[in-house]
Amino acid sequence: MTNGIFALIESILVKYSLVTAFAVVALVVWFSYWASARFTKGHLHGSAIAIFIALLAAGFCGMLTKGKQGVADIAWLSGVGLLGGAMLRDFAIVATAFGVKLEQFTRTGFSGVLSLFLGLFVSFFLGAAAAWAFGYRDAVSLTTIGGGAGTFIIGPVTGTALGASSEVIALSVAAGLVKAILVMCLTPFVAPLIGLDNPRSALIFGGLMGTTSGVAAGLAATDEKLVPYGAMTATFYTGLGCLIGPSVVFVIIRALVG
Amino acid sequence: MAIYGTGLLAGCLLAGLFIGELLGRLVGIEANIGGVGIAMILLIVSAERMRKAGLLPELTQSGIIFWSAVYIPVIVAMAASQNVWTALSGGPAAIAAGAVAALVCFALVPLVDKIGRDKNGDAPTP
Protein backbone atom coordinates (compact mmCIF):
# COMPACT_ATOMS: atom_id res chain seq x y z
CA MET A 1 0.00 0.00 0.00
CA THR A 2 2.68 2.54 1.03
CA ASN A 3 4.74 1.41 -1.95
CA GLY A 4 1.80 2.18 -4.16
CA ILE A 5 1.46 5.66 -2.66
CA PHE A 6 5.15 6.44 -3.17
CA ALA A 7 5.04 5.18 -6.74
CA LEU A 8 2.01 7.38 -7.35
CA ILE A 9 3.73 10.45 -5.89
CA GLU A 10 6.85 9.77 -7.91
CA SER A 11 4.89 9.40 -11.11
CA ILE A 12 3.35 12.83 -10.55
CA LEU A 13 6.72 14.40 -9.71
CA VAL A 14 8.23 12.90 -12.87
CA LYS A 15 5.33 13.86 -15.10
CA TYR A 16 5.32 17.46 -13.82
CA SER A 17 9.08 17.69 -13.44
CA LEU A 18 9.39 21.42 -14.08
CA VAL A 19 6.76 22.15 -11.42
CA THR A 20 8.65 19.78 -9.09
CA ALA A 21 11.79 21.78 -9.82
CA PHE A 22 10.06 25.05 -8.85
CA ALA A 23 9.02 23.50 -5.54
CA VAL A 24 12.38 21.90 -4.75
CA VAL A 25 14.41 24.99 -5.67
CA ALA A 26 12.05 27.18 -3.66
CA LEU A 27 12.61 24.94 -0.63
CA VAL A 28 16.39 25.04 -1.01
CA VAL A 29 16.38 28.83 -1.45
CA TRP A 30 14.03 29.31 1.51
CA PHE A 31 16.19 27.11 3.75
CA SER A 32 19.36 28.90 2.60
CA TYR A 33 18.05 32.38 3.33
CA TRP A 34 16.82 31.18 6.71
CA ALA A 35 20.23 29.64 7.47
CA SER A 36 21.98 32.79 6.26
CA ALA A 37 20.00 34.98 8.67
CA ARG A 38 20.04 32.49 11.54
CA PHE A 39 23.66 31.34 11.51
CA THR A 40 25.67 34.02 9.67
CA LYS A 41 23.56 37.10 10.48
CA GLY A 42 23.34 37.64 6.72
CA HIS A 43 27.12 37.89 6.25
CA LEU A 44 27.09 34.91 3.92
CA HIS A 45 24.36 35.55 1.34
CA GLY A 46 21.45 33.14 1.24
CA SER A 47 22.08 32.75 -2.48
CA ALA A 48 25.69 31.69 -1.79
CA ILE A 49 24.49 29.00 0.61
CA ALA A 50 21.85 27.84 -1.88
CA ILE A 51 24.41 27.57 -4.69
CA PHE A 52 26.77 25.67 -2.41
CA ILE A 53 24.04 23.21 -1.37
CA ALA A 54 23.12 22.79 -5.04
CA LEU A 55 26.72 21.99 -6.02
CA LEU A 56 27.06 19.49 -3.16
CA ALA A 57 23.84 17.80 -4.23
CA ALA A 58 25.02 17.76 -7.85
CA GLY A 59 28.33 16.14 -6.84
CA PHE A 60 26.60 13.56 -4.68
CA CYS A 61 24.05 12.64 -7.39
CA GLY A 62 26.82 12.49 -9.98
CA MET A 63 28.66 9.99 -7.80
CA LEU A 64 25.53 7.83 -7.52
CA THR A 65 24.21 8.02 -11.08
CA LYS A 66 27.49 8.54 -12.98
CA GLY A 67 25.47 10.94 -15.12
CA LYS A 68 26.51 14.33 -16.44
CA GLN A 69 23.76 16.58 -15.18
CA GLY A 70 24.05 16.50 -11.41
CA VAL A 71 20.68 16.11 -9.68
CA ALA A 72 18.87 16.29 -13.03
CA ASP A 73 19.89 12.69 -13.75
CA ILE A 74 17.41 11.56 -11.10
CA ALA A 75 14.05 11.17 -12.86
CA TRP A 76 11.89 13.22 -10.48
CA LEU A 77 14.50 16.01 -10.42
CA SER A 78 14.95 16.17 -14.19
CA GLY A 79 13.02 19.46 -14.24
CA VAL A 80 15.91 21.09 -12.38
CA GLY A 81 17.98 20.50 -15.52
CA LEU A 82 15.43 22.37 -17.60
CA LEU A 83 15.03 25.21 -15.09
CA GLY A 84 18.81 25.60 -14.78
CA GLY A 85 19.65 24.82 -18.41
CA ALA A 86 21.20 27.26 -20.86
CA MET A 87 17.81 28.36 -22.24
CA LEU A 88 16.20 29.68 -19.06
CA ARG A 89 19.56 30.74 -17.62
CA ASP A 90 20.25 33.05 -20.57
CA PHE A 91 16.64 34.26 -20.52
CA ALA A 92 16.98 35.26 -16.86
CA ILE A 93 20.43 36.81 -17.38
CA VAL A 94 19.10 39.07 -20.14
CA ALA A 95 16.15 40.02 -17.91
CA THR A 96 18.58 41.27 -15.22
CA ALA A 97 19.76 43.93 -17.69
CA PHE A 98 16.29 45.51 -17.62
CA GLY A 99 16.56 48.96 -16.08
CA VAL A 100 20.35 49.15 -16.38
CA LYS A 101 21.77 52.28 -18.03
CA LEU A 102 23.68 51.69 -21.26
CA GLU A 103 26.46 54.12 -20.21
CA GLN A 104 27.41 51.71 -17.42
CA PHE A 105 28.61 49.31 -20.10
CA THR A 106 30.21 51.75 -22.53
CA ARG A 107 32.09 53.61 -19.79
CA THR A 108 34.11 50.50 -18.99
CA GLY A 109 34.56 49.67 -22.67
CA PHE A 110 38.34 49.63 -22.87
CA SER A 111 38.88 47.78 -19.60
CA GLY A 112 36.19 45.30 -20.58
CA VAL A 113 37.95 44.41 -23.83
CA LEU A 114 41.32 44.30 -22.10
CA SER A 115 39.97 41.99 -19.40
CA LEU A 116 38.58 39.63 -22.05
CA PHE A 117 41.86 39.17 -23.89
CA LEU A 118 43.99 39.14 -20.74
CA GLY A 119 41.64 36.60 -19.13
CA LEU A 120 41.77 34.36 -22.20
CA PHE A 121 45.54 34.42 -22.68
CA VAL A 122 46.26 33.98 -18.96
CA SER A 123 43.88 31.01 -18.73
CA PHE A 124 45.24 29.38 -21.89
CA PHE A 125 48.86 29.67 -20.81
CA LEU A 126 48.38 28.81 -17.14
CA GLY A 127 46.23 25.83 -18.11
CA ALA A 128 48.89 24.72 -20.58
CA ALA A 129 51.59 25.22 -17.93
CA ALA A 130 49.64 23.03 -15.49
CA ALA A 131 49.30 20.36 -18.20
CA TRP A 132 53.06 20.62 -18.86
CA ALA A 133 53.73 20.08 -15.14
CA PHE A 134 51.70 16.86 -15.33
CA GLY A 135 53.71 15.49 -18.22
CA TYR A 136 51.93 16.68 -21.36
CA ARG A 137 54.44 17.87 -23.95
CA ASP A 138 52.70 18.19 -27.34
CA ALA A 139 51.27 21.54 -28.44
CA VAL A 140 47.85 20.09 -29.31
CA SER A 141 47.24 18.66 -25.82
CA LEU A 142 48.67 21.72 -24.10
CA THR A 143 46.46 24.12 -26.10
CA THR A 144 43.37 21.97 -25.55
CA ILE A 145 43.84 21.74 -21.77
CA GLY A 146 44.67 25.46 -21.74
CA GLY A 147 41.36 26.09 -23.51
CA GLY A 148 39.62 24.03 -20.84
CA ALA A 149 41.13 26.34 -18.23
CA GLY A 150 39.23 29.08 -20.10
CA THR A 151 35.80 27.44 -20.17
CA PHE A 152 34.56 23.87 -20.56
CA ILE A 153 33.37 24.75 -24.04
CA ILE A 154 36.60 26.31 -25.36
CA GLY A 155 38.56 23.17 -24.41
CA PRO A 156 36.60 20.65 -26.48
CA VAL A 157 36.07 23.07 -29.39
CA THR A 158 39.82 23.77 -29.55
CA GLY A 159 40.68 20.11 -29.06
CA THR A 160 38.31 18.98 -31.81
CA ALA A 161 39.68 21.58 -34.21
CA LEU A 162 43.28 20.52 -33.50
CA GLY A 163 42.58 16.77 -33.39
CA ALA A 164 43.37 16.17 -29.70
CA SER A 165 42.80 12.74 -28.17
CA SER A 166 39.47 12.12 -26.45
CA GLU A 167 41.29 11.63 -23.15
CA VAL A 168 42.79 15.13 -23.41
CA ILE A 169 39.42 16.61 -24.44
CA ALA A 170 37.76 15.00 -21.41
CA LEU A 171 40.51 16.46 -19.24
CA SER A 172 39.92 19.93 -20.68
CA VAL A 173 36.19 19.68 -19.88
CA ALA A 174 37.05 18.69 -16.31
CA ALA A 175 39.44 21.65 -16.01
CA GLY A 176 36.71 24.04 -17.18
CA LEU A 177 34.23 22.54 -14.71
CA VAL A 178 36.72 22.91 -11.85
CA LYS A 179 37.17 26.58 -12.76
CA ALA A 180 33.42 27.23 -13.04
CA ILE A 181 32.74 25.58 -9.69
CA LEU A 182 35.58 27.42 -7.96
CA VAL A 183 34.33 30.75 -9.31
CA MET A 184 30.82 29.93 -8.06
CA CYS A 185 32.03 29.05 -4.56
CA LEU A 186 34.89 31.49 -4.02
CA THR A 187 33.57 34.75 -5.51
CA PRO A 188 31.55 35.85 -2.45
CA PHE A 189 34.63 35.35 -0.24
CA VAL A 190 37.16 36.92 -2.62
CA ALA A 191 34.96 39.86 -3.67
CA PRO A 192 35.89 42.21 -0.77
CA LEU A 193 39.61 41.55 -1.38
CA ILE A 194 39.54 42.44 -5.08
CA GLY A 195 37.16 45.41 -4.93
CA LEU A 196 34.33 43.54 -6.63
CA ASP A 197 31.52 45.82 -5.45
CA ASN A 198 30.67 48.09 -8.41
CA PRO A 199 29.53 47.74 -12.03
CA ARG A 200 32.98 48.54 -13.39
CA SER A 201 34.86 45.85 -11.48
CA ALA A 202 32.02 43.39 -12.21
CA LEU A 203 32.45 43.98 -15.98
CA ILE A 204 36.19 43.35 -15.62
CA PHE A 205 35.56 40.31 -13.45
CA GLY A 206 33.25 38.84 -16.11
CA GLY A 207 35.84 39.35 -18.83
CA LEU A 208 38.71 37.88 -16.83
CA MET A 209 36.79 34.81 -15.62
CA GLY A 210 34.76 34.15 -18.73
CA THR A 211 32.86 31.13 -17.47
CA THR A 212 29.23 32.27 -17.84
CA SER A 213 27.92 29.79 -15.28
CA GLY A 214 30.69 30.60 -12.81
CA VAL A 215 30.28 34.35 -13.20
CA ALA A 216 26.48 34.21 -13.14
CA ALA A 217 26.46 32.20 -9.91
CA GLY A 218 29.47 33.88 -8.31
CA LEU A 219 27.95 37.35 -8.73
CA ALA A 220 24.51 36.12 -7.66
CA ALA A 221 26.14 34.90 -4.44
CA THR A 222 27.95 38.21 -3.97
CA ASP A 223 25.54 40.96 -5.04
CA GLU A 224 22.70 40.35 -7.45
CA LYS A 225 22.89 43.91 -8.79
CA LEU A 226 26.29 43.17 -10.35
CA VAL A 227 25.02 40.23 -12.44
CA PRO A 228 24.23 42.03 -15.72
CA TYR A 229 27.68 43.67 -15.84
CA GLY A 230 29.69 40.51 -15.28
CA ALA A 231 27.46 38.47 -17.57
CA MET A 232 27.82 41.04 -20.34
CA THR A 233 31.57 40.54 -20.80
CA ALA A 234 31.60 36.85 -19.90
CA THR A 235 29.22 36.15 -22.77
CA PHE A 236 31.89 37.19 -25.30
CA TYR A 237 34.62 35.08 -23.71
CA THR A 238 33.79 31.59 -24.95
CA GLY A 239 33.26 32.73 -28.54
CA LEU A 240 36.55 34.63 -28.60
CA GLY A 241 38.32 31.71 -26.93
CA CYS A 242 37.07 29.31 -29.62
CA LEU A 243 38.38 31.80 -32.17
CA ILE A 244 41.91 32.33 -30.82
CA GLY A 245 42.46 28.85 -29.30
CA PRO A 246 43.05 26.76 -32.43
CA SER A 247 44.73 29.71 -34.18
CA VAL A 248 46.83 32.32 -32.35
CA VAL A 249 47.28 30.46 -29.08
CA PHE A 250 48.13 27.16 -30.78
CA VAL A 251 50.75 28.82 -32.97
CA ILE A 252 52.37 30.48 -29.94
CA ILE A 253 52.35 27.32 -27.83
CA ARG A 254 53.73 25.26 -30.72
CA ALA A 255 56.56 27.79 -31.11
CA LEU A 256 57.26 27.60 -27.37
CA VAL A 257 57.38 23.80 -27.06
CA GLY A 258 58.98 23.19 -30.43
CA MET B 1 -0.35 42.49 -20.56
CA ALA B 2 2.61 40.81 -18.90
CA ILE B 3 3.16 38.57 -21.92
CA TYR B 4 4.14 41.63 -23.98
CA GLY B 5 7.11 42.18 -21.68
CA THR B 6 8.07 38.52 -21.75
CA GLY B 7 7.68 38.55 -25.51
CA LEU B 8 9.98 41.56 -25.79
CA LEU B 9 12.53 39.76 -23.62
CA ALA B 10 12.24 36.61 -25.76
CA GLY B 11 12.58 38.61 -28.98
CA CYS B 12 15.72 40.32 -27.69
CA LEU B 13 17.33 37.02 -26.66
CA LEU B 14 16.52 35.32 -29.97
CA ALA B 15 17.78 38.31 -31.99
CA GLY B 16 20.92 38.55 -29.86
CA LEU B 17 21.67 34.84 -30.27
CA PHE B 18 21.16 35.15 -34.02
CA ILE B 19 23.60 38.08 -34.27
CA GLY B 20 26.07 36.20 -32.03
CA GLU B 21 25.91 33.16 -34.32
CA LEU B 22 26.38 35.38 -37.38
CA LEU B 23 29.44 36.99 -35.76
CA GLY B 24 30.84 33.51 -35.15
CA ARG B 25 30.27 32.39 -38.75
CA LEU B 26 31.78 35.64 -39.96
CA VAL B 27 35.11 34.81 -38.32
CA GLY B 28 34.79 31.15 -39.24
CA ILE B 29 33.89 29.40 -35.99
CA GLU B 30 30.84 27.43 -34.93
CA ALA B 31 30.37 29.32 -31.67
CA ASN B 32 28.18 32.12 -30.48
CA ILE B 33 30.10 35.35 -29.90
CA GLY B 34 28.37 37.50 -27.30
CA GLY B 35 24.80 36.60 -28.19
CA VAL B 36 23.54 37.05 -24.65
CA GLY B 37 25.44 40.32 -24.23
CA ILE B 38 24.01 41.67 -27.47
CA ALA B 39 20.53 40.61 -26.29
CA MET B 40 21.07 42.62 -23.10
CA ILE B 41 21.94 45.73 -25.10
CA LEU B 42 18.90 45.19 -27.35
CA LEU B 43 16.66 44.91 -24.29
CA ILE B 44 18.09 48.04 -22.66
CA VAL B 45 17.74 50.11 -25.83
CA SER B 46 14.31 48.87 -26.89
CA ALA B 47 12.85 49.13 -23.38
CA GLU B 48 14.13 52.70 -23.08
CA ARG B 49 12.56 53.66 -26.42
CA MET B 50 9.27 52.02 -25.55
CA ARG B 51 9.23 53.75 -22.19
CA LYS B 52 9.69 57.12 -23.88
CA ALA B 53 6.95 56.32 -26.37
CA GLY B 54 4.65 55.35 -23.51
CA LEU B 55 4.51 51.74 -24.69
CA LEU B 56 5.84 50.19 -21.50
CA PRO B 57 3.09 50.23 -18.85
CA GLU B 58 3.75 48.60 -15.49
CA LEU B 59 1.94 45.41 -16.43
CA THR B 60 4.17 44.94 -19.47
CA GLN B 61 7.26 45.58 -17.34
CA SER B 62 6.15 42.92 -14.89
CA GLY B 63 6.57 40.34 -17.66
CA ILE B 64 10.28 41.18 -17.72
CA ILE B 65 10.78 41.81 -14.01
CA PHE B 66 9.45 38.38 -13.13
CA TRP B 67 12.29 36.71 -15.03
CA SER B 68 14.84 38.99 -13.45
CA ALA B 69 13.37 38.13 -10.05
CA VAL B 70 13.67 34.37 -10.57
CA TYR B 71 17.31 34.75 -11.59
CA ILE B 72 18.67 33.36 -8.29
CA PRO B 73 16.46 30.22 -8.33
CA VAL B 74 17.42 29.59 -11.96
CA ILE B 75 21.10 29.88 -11.01
CA VAL B 76 20.58 27.52 -8.06
CA ALA B 77 19.01 25.01 -10.46
CA MET B 78 21.95 25.54 -12.82
CA ALA B 79 24.42 24.82 -10.00
CA ALA B 80 22.45 21.69 -9.09
CA SER B 81 22.75 20.36 -12.64
CA GLN B 82 26.50 20.92 -12.98
CA ASN B 83 28.72 17.96 -13.70
CA VAL B 84 30.50 18.31 -10.35
CA TRP B 85 31.47 14.65 -10.12
CA THR B 86 33.36 14.73 -13.43
CA ALA B 87 35.18 17.86 -12.28
CA LEU B 88 36.27 16.23 -9.03
CA SER B 89 37.24 12.95 -10.67
CA GLY B 90 39.10 14.67 -13.52
CA GLY B 91 42.40 14.09 -11.76
CA PRO B 92 45.11 16.44 -10.51
CA ALA B 93 45.99 17.89 -13.93
CA ALA B 94 42.43 19.07 -14.55
CA ILE B 95 42.05 20.43 -11.03
CA ALA B 96 45.40 22.24 -11.22
CA ALA B 97 44.64 23.78 -14.64
CA GLY B 98 41.19 25.01 -13.62
CA ALA B 99 42.22 26.19 -10.15
CA VAL B 100 45.34 28.10 -11.20
CA ALA B 101 43.42 29.91 -13.96
CA ALA B 102 40.60 30.86 -11.59
CA LEU B 103 42.87 32.06 -8.78
CA VAL B 104 45.19 34.14 -10.95
CA CYS B 105 42.24 35.77 -12.75
CA PHE B 106 40.71 36.70 -9.38
CA ALA B 107 43.97 38.47 -8.54
CA LEU B 108 43.98 40.30 -11.88
CA VAL B 109 40.64 42.05 -11.26
CA PRO B 110 42.04 44.98 -9.20
CA LEU B 111 44.96 45.31 -11.62
CA VAL B 112 42.83 45.71 -14.77
CA ASP B 113 40.45 47.92 -12.80
CA LYS B 114 43.38 50.27 -12.12
CA ILE B 115 44.89 50.24 -15.63
CA GLY B 116 41.70 51.13 -17.46
CA ARG B 117 40.73 53.77 -14.95
CA ASP B 118 44.03 55.63 -15.29
CA LYS B 119 43.66 55.69 -19.06
CA ASN B 120 40.07 56.85 -19.06
CA GLY B 121 40.46 59.09 -16.06
CA ASP B 122 37.01 58.28 -14.75
CA ALA B 123 36.13 57.46 -11.20
CA PRO B 124 34.69 54.09 -10.28
CA THR B 125 30.93 54.06 -10.43
CA PRO B 126 29.27 53.78 -7.03
Image (spheres, helix red, strand yellow):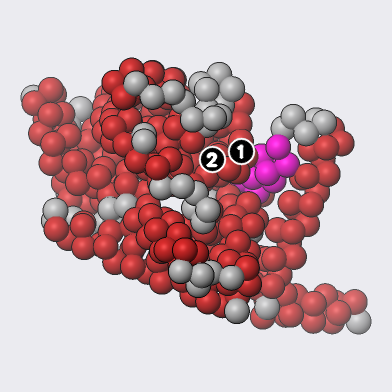
Q: CA distance from mark 2 to mark 1?
A: 6 Å
Q: Assess whether residue A98 is covered by the magenta stretch.
A: no
Q: Name the residue at the right extreme.
A: A1
Number of marks in picture: 2
Label pair 2/1, CB-CB below 8 angstroms: yes
Give the percent coordinates (x, y) of residue B18: 29, 66
Q: Give the residue type that dot 1 points to.
A: Asp
The residue closer to the viewer here, A127 or B106, is: B106
Q: Chain of mark 2?
A: A
Residue name at image x 74 percent, y 29 percent: A43
The residue closer to the viewer here, A42 or B64, is: B64
Residue name at image x 45 percent, y 59 percent: B48
Residue name at image x 78 percent, y 44 percent: A33
Q: Name the residue at the front extreme.
A: B53
Residue name at image x 63 percent, y 72 percent: B59
Give the percent coordinates (x, y) of residue A170: 35, 46
Is residue A173 visible to us here?
no
Which mark, residue A226?
A: 2
Q: Main secondary structure of the magenta part?
A: helix
Q: Chain of mark 1?
A: A
Give the percent coordinates (x, y) of residue B47: 46, 63
Is residue B82 visible to us here?
yes
Give the percent coordinates (x, y) of residue B74: 60, 57
Q: Is residue A29 above or below residue A237?
A: below
- Mark 1 secondary-structure assignment: loop
Q: Which residues are magenta?
A: A45-56
- State left or right for residue A135 relative to residue B12: left
Residue behind mark 1: A223
Residue B119 found in image quarter: top left
- Mark 2 secondary-structure assignment: helix
Q: Is residue B15 above or below residue A168?
A: below
Q: Give the residue type that dot 2 points to.
A: Leu
